[in-house]
Image (tube, rainbow, N blue to C red):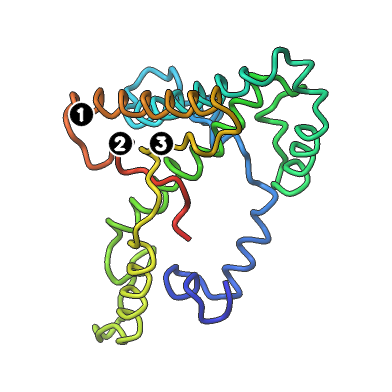
């Protein structure tokens, strides 16, 4: 975001224009964009009478993530009341409500329940893996040269300055280092064996989804568990 930084040189905005755009749109963020079902309902495309293969692909991944979050929470909370009365959970939600534009209540609903907390948790997993692959890595891989979005060229036809190409090389080096894949065993993160078992089930479900998708015709726009990373490229 700084003057002369990547945002100004990659996107068709000046540094001042980029800051103005962020300032004017910051409060418009809607966390329901991280839940494929709610997002489709909000945009009026769910059940609209036409095929939505991309939505189905995204939903399949979210469903696995939601099932994992739900199963994990149910291991440690026997009721919605027990979850909502947990001071640590409440503090977590309060902090999210304070720091995320628009808060998280649209996703949580009127009360914190095991179900609503699971969908919120799944949304964060989805954000760092699926959503980032769609909006970040995918667009980066297939964007048009001259490494400006929208694409633009000099009126007189002159070549790009060398530093623009060098910036692409530098950025791709940073983005293509080895990163933790989502399709791996994260059971070591669990606090006990039952939690570890839940992570192993998550891995099994992701592998099952990968196998199912491999039975379908391949498409470059599709998301597959095997290409997802467990952290955002930044």
Q: Residue visible at 69% across and 27% down? A: 108
**Which quadrant of the figure has residue 29?**
top right
Q: Along the line of sight, which residue is nearer the eye, 92 or 137?
A: 92
**Which quadrant of the figure has residue 223?**
top left
Q: Residue visible at 42% across and 20% down? A: 48
**Is mark 2 in CB contact (under 8 Å) with mark 1?**
yes
Q: On the image, numbered disc 2 is attached to which residue? A: 224
Residue 139: horizontal and vertical position, in percent? 35, 54
Image quadrant in which the N terminus is located = bottom right
Checking the image for residue 185, the label placed there is: 3
Checking the image for residue 214, the label placed there is: 1
Question: In this image, 215 relative to 2: left or right?
Answer: left
Residue 152: horizontal and vertical position, in percent? 34, 71
Distance in Å between CA atoms under marks 3 and 1: 21 Å
Q: Along the line of sight, which residue is nearer the eye, 195 or 18?
A: 195
Q: Is residue 160 above or below residue 226?
A: below
Numbered disc in front, either 3 or 2: 3
């Amino acid at each position: 975001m700084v003057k002369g930084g990547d945002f100004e040189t990659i996107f068709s905005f000046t540094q001042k224009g980029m800051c103005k755009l962020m300032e004017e749109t910051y409060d418009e963020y809607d966390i329901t964009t991280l839940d494929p079902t709610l997002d489709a309902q909000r945009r009026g495309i769910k059940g609209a009478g036409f095929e939505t293969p991309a939505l189905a692909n995204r939903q399949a991944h979210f469903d696995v993530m939601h099932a994992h979050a739900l199963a994990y929470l149910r291991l440690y909370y026997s009721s919605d009341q027990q979850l909502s009365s947990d001071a640590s959970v409440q503090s977590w939600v309060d902090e999210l409500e304070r720091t995320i534009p628009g808060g998280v209540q649209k996703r949580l609903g009127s009360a914190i329940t095991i179900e609503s907390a699971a969908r919120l948790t799944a949304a964060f997993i989805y954000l760092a893996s699926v959503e980032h692959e769609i909006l970040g890595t995918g667009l980066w891989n297939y964007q048009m040269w001259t490494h400006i979005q929208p694409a633009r060229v000099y009126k007189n036809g002159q070549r790009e300055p060398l530093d623009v190409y060098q910036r692409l090389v530098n950025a791709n080096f940073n983005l293509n280092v080895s990163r933790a894949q989502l399709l791996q065993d994260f059971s070591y993160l669990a606090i006990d064996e039952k939690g570890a078992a839940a992570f192993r089930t998550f891995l099994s479900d992701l592998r099952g989804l990968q196998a199912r998708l491999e039975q379908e015709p391949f498409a470059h726009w599709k998301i597959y568990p095997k290409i997802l990373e467990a952290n955002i490229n930044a």
